[in-house]
Structures are given as structure tokens and as C-alpha cells.
């Protein structure tokens, strides 16, 4: 992002439900992707999450617009 690498660490939990992925907008089997973020103080955490495809390879190949992905990534580094 902006000529820099940005990585996040999160956990995906299967939901056993189908719906629309927040990143690629396909109707697929979804997982709940949760990322804990650290605030300015060391003991203050918050959580940001989205429903995303369980098949990450298919999702990556199906993304046509990065707007939602970029918005999610930027929200994790505030």
C-alpha cells in the first residue's frame, strides 16, 4: 500500500453460512475474519471484523475493486 508492505494478523472462523464476501462481493461460503488492533495504550485493544470467503485463493482472484479491502486494512492500523 503506497509502495509499502502492510500485513495484518487475524483469525478466520467458519460460519457455515453463505453470503456476500466483503472483499470480492461473490456469494460464497463465508468466514468471520477478526483482527485485534492495539490502541495508543499498551493494554487497550479493539477488534475489527468482516465476513469473507473461506476460499482465500478464489477470493484473491475474484477481487475486481480494492476499495473495501483497502478500507479494512487501513482500519486495522489506526
Image: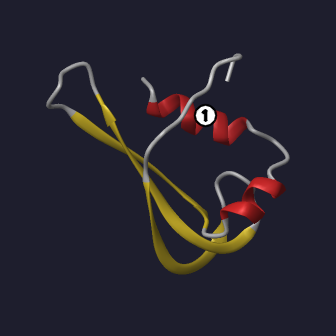
Seen at 43% across and 50% down, the residue is: 10
Provide residue 69's location: percent of width, then percent of height: 65, 41
Whether 47 is drawn above or below 43: the answer is below
Whether 47 is drawn above or below 5: the answer is below
Image quadrant assignment for residue 36:
top left
Quadrant showing the N terminus: top right
Image quadrant assignment for residue 57:
bottom right
Mark 1 lies on residue: 71
Whether 69 is drawn above or below 42: the answer is below
Provide residue 66's location: percent of width, then percent of height: 75, 39
Quadrant showing the C terminus: top left
Judged from this view, the residue extending furthest toward the bottom is: 16
Foreground pick, 75 / 1? 1
Neighbourhood count class around disc 1 (C-alpha, 10 Å): few under 14, some 14–19, many 20 upward: few
SS type, badge 1 = helix
Q: Is residue 61 left or right of residue 23?
A: right
Amino acid at each position: 500500500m503506497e509502495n509499502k508492505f502492510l500485513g495484518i494478523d487475524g483469525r478466520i472462523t467458519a460460519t457455515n453460512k453463505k453470503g456476500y464476501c466483503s472483499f470480492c462481493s461473490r456469494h460464497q461460503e463465508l468466514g468471520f475474519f477478526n483482527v485485534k488492533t492495539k490502541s495508543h495504550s499498551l493494554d487497550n485493544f479493539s477488534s475489527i471484523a468482516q465476513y469473507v470467503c473461506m476460499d482465500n485463493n478464489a477470493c484473491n482472484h475474484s477481487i475486481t475493486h480494492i476499495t473495501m479491502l483497502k478500507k479494512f486494512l487501513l482500519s486495522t492500523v489506526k
